[in-house]
Amino acid sequence: MSKTSIIIPTFNRPAELTQCIRSVTEQTVKPSELILVDDGELSTFPLKDDCESAGIQCRYHKKSQPGLTASRNAGIAMATGEILFFLDDDVELFPDYVEEILRAYALSNGSPVMGVGGIIANSEPVTVFQRGRHFFDRLFLVSGPCEGKVLRSGFSTDYGSTGRPLSDITDVDFL
């Protein structure tokens, strides 16, 4: 099994971050390490004891200059894993998320870059206006029926809006 690192940049959302970390500790396959890159004002590493008792090594980096890209790069520099996961601090993972990514990675013939999509499980119900907008966007090729593709119009599909996320290993134009 490959060594895995989860990198979570965060900025002043301790409640959401705690939920995110809790979902990491509940994985069927635990990551090797959890790297928290703080641009905000955390007083402690949430659920650090829970992570360590689950066998997840915890690393913390405090940055003084905010910025998501710099935070991800700082996490990369600290990571010891062969496979890196980047999570937003308000993400809550399904319990088999890491296991499914490792399964997909094993089937990918060693591709050095890949992604696994997900769903927004706590989204607001779709309004009539949103349905109409989605129909209009598809009609005029502003959006499409398949994620990760650039359309002939030059627009790319709106991630998460098709209602039909990919379920098989598929080549895409972008992640």
Image (cartoon, rainbow, N blue to C red):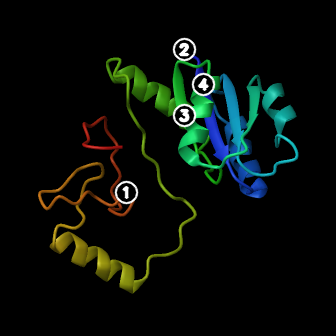
- Farthest residue in the left direction? 152
Q: Which residue is disc 4 drawn over? A: 77
> Which callout, 4 or 3, points at the residue further toward the start of the chain?
4
Q: Amino acid at mark 1?
A: Tyr
Q: Which residue is disc 1 drawn over? A: 159
In this rendering, position of residue 45 left or right of residue 103: right
Quarter in which the C terminus is drawn: top left
Vertical arrangement, residue 80 with respect to residue 155, above or below: above
Q: Are marks 4 and 1 in contact (CB under 8 Å)?
A: no
Label 4: which secondary element: helix
Q: Amino acid at mark 3?
A: Phe
Q: Which residue is disc 2 drawn over? A: 1
Between the C-alphas of marks 3 and 1, the distance is: 18 Å
Residue 33 lies, in percent from the top left, at: 68, 25
- Farthest residue in the top direction? 1
Tag on residue 136? none
Between the C-alphas of marks 2 and 1, the distance is: 30 Å
Q: Which mark is nearer the camera, 3 or 2?
A: 3
Residue plotted at (41% across, 29% down): 104
Q: Which mark is nearer the camera, 4 or 1?
A: 4
In this rendering, position of residue 64 left or right of residue 105: right
Vertical arrangement, residue 116 with respect to residue 159, above or below: above
Task: Classify residue 144 by image quadrant.
Answer: bottom left
> Which callout, 2 or 1, points at the residue further toward the start of the chain?
2
Q: How many other residues sit within 10 Å of disc 2, few (<14), some (14-19) or many (≥20)?
A: few
Task: Classify residue 163 by image quadrant.
Answer: bottom left
Residue plotted at (25% across, 57% down): 156
Between the C-alphas of marks 3 and 2, the distance is: 15 Å
Label 2: which secondary element: loop
Q: Which residue is disc 3 drawn over? A: 85
Residue plotted at (58% across, 17% down): 3
